[in-house]
């Protein structure tokens, strides 16, 4: 698995405050406006656009604070931090939901998605900067306490570890789930039109202020590791779906003349040599899209295609490295419905 990199662009993130009217049960018109909230969570930014009669800024902030206290590994008193320190703590529903979904996708991906892989990622370093100093002995020692089968929830909702050194990091799924959690909050307040984006992961319902599906741009593959050039490969029209991306074809390593994304295979402990450089996944919920976008990076195109067919409502769009060092595109049957026209 890997650190998430974003190659999506939300079209027109500088929002205007548009107004529209709808009729209530008495036939009277009520005016709503599109609000835009932004901030930071999990060391990444978020943008939330929604149509409502008033701002829900305080409610959104409170929900994100609740999420932080559960799943933010950078907070000293969060549930996930205390679990990693083997302190007595009872996981809340947010933690339990993410944990169970993680275990489900670990099994469906054959172990290519694994929330216990952080020790291996840390050993290789950001961008594999420690590649020259990693030895087979280091990898073998770390693999003793890496593996999703080494941690579980008992019937009382308590974490059980087969080795106390096992730690978890849900960064490859938590941002997607945070989008879903905020979306649920908005819907509890009667919001029907919204777009929630956290670190490039997106949950969208209804339409934007122009009355159209939300439009998301996917960057064109360009050999530009500095990320200074941006051209759109395609634009996605997203209504009542969630979308997540993993990988970055602008930032790869080269081995024997071939390009590979910076992805660790949780099962081998070594860099994955699959040719997918970027995976975009559309699903009914963002937690699922987020996790599978990461899993596909380590699974490779052919295995990913097989697994995707087994998941109802899931669609993929892959950018991959071809043998001649150019980029190729592959997407699932039915993905065409999301191309903006």
Image: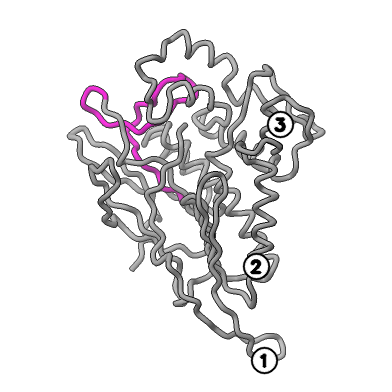
Give the label, 1 or 3, closer to the camera: 3
Q: Nearer the viewer, residue 56 or 218?
A: 56
In the displayed structure image, the side of residue 165 where residue 13 appears, left or right:
left
In this rendering, position of residue 300 left or right of residue 174:
left
Tell me what residue is drawn at x 53 percent, y 15 percent.
142
From the top left corner, tell me how far across and down residue 186 is, in percent.
64, 64
Q: CA distance from mark 1 to mark 3?
A: 52 Å
The residue identified by callout 3 is 82
Mark number, residue 28? 1
Disc 3 residue crowd, few under 14, some 14–19, many 20+, Cα 10 Å: some
Residue 141 drawn at (x, y percent): 53, 11
Q: Relative to the observer, which residue lies in front, 94 or 79?
A: 79
- Which label is found at residue 56? 2
Is residue 263 within the magenta segment? yes
Quadrant assignment, res 114: top right
Q: Using the rendered view, name the quadrant where residue 258 is placed.
A: top left
Q: Which residues are magenta?
A: 255-281
Q: Earlier in the sequence, mark 3 or mark 2?
A: 2
SS type, badge 2: loop
Q: Is residue 278 magenta?
A: yes
Secondary structure of residue under mark 3: helix
Q: Nearer the viewer, mark 1 or mark 2?
A: 2
State which tag comes first along the sequence, 1 or 3: 1
- Report how far apart the C-alphas of labels 1 and 2 lie in the structure: 23 Å
- For marks 1 and 2 on the same chain, the one whose residue lies earlier in the sequence: 1
State yes or no: discs 1 and 3 in contact (Cβ < 8 Å).
no
When the figure is inspected, residue 207 is found, relative to residue 48, above or below; the finding is below
In the rendered view of the protein, which quadrant contains the C terminus? Answer: bottom left
């Amino acid at each position: 698995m890997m650190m998430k990199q974003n190659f999506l662009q939300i079209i027109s993130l500088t929002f205007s405050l548009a107004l529209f009217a709808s009729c209530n049960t008495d036939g009277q018109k009520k005016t709503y406006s599109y609000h835009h909230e932004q901030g930071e969570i999990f060391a990444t930014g978020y943008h939330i656009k929604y149509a409502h009669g008033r701002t829900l800024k305080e409610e959104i902030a409170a929900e994100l604070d609740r999420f932080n206290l559960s799943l933010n590994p950078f907070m000293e008193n969060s549930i996930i931090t205390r679990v990693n320190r083997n302190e007595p703590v009872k996981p809340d529903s947010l933690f339990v939901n993410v944990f169970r979904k993680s275990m489900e996708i670990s099994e469906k991906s054959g172990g290519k998605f694994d929330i216990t892989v952080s020790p291996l990622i840390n050993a290789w370093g950001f961008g594999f900067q420690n590649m020259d100093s990693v030895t087979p002995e280091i990898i073998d020692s770390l693999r003793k306490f890496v593996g999703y089968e080494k941690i579980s929830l008992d019937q009382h909702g308590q974490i059980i570890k087969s080795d106390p050194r096992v730690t978890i990091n849900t960064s490859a799924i938590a941002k997607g789930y945070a989008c879903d959690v905020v979306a649920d909050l908005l819907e509890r307040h009667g919001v029907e039109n919204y777009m929630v984006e956290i670190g490039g992961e997106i949950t969208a319902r209804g339409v934007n202020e122009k009355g159209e599906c939300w439009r998301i741009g996917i960057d064109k593959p360009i050999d530009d590791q500095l990320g200074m050039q941006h051209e759109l490969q395609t634009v996605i029209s997203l209504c009542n779906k969630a979308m997540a991306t993993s990988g970055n074809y602008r930032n790869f390593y080269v081995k024997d003349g071939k390009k590979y994304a910076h992805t660790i295979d949780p099962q081998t402990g070594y860099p994955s040599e699959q040719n997918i450089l970027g995976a975009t996944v559309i699903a009914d919920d963002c937690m699922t899209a987020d996790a599978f976008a990461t899993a596909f990076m380590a699974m490779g195109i052919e295995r990913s295609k097989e697994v995707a067919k087994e998941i109802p409502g899931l669609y993929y769009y892959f950018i991959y490295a071809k043998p001649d060092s150019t980029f190729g595109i592959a997407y699932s049957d039915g993905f065409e419905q999301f191309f903006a026209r």
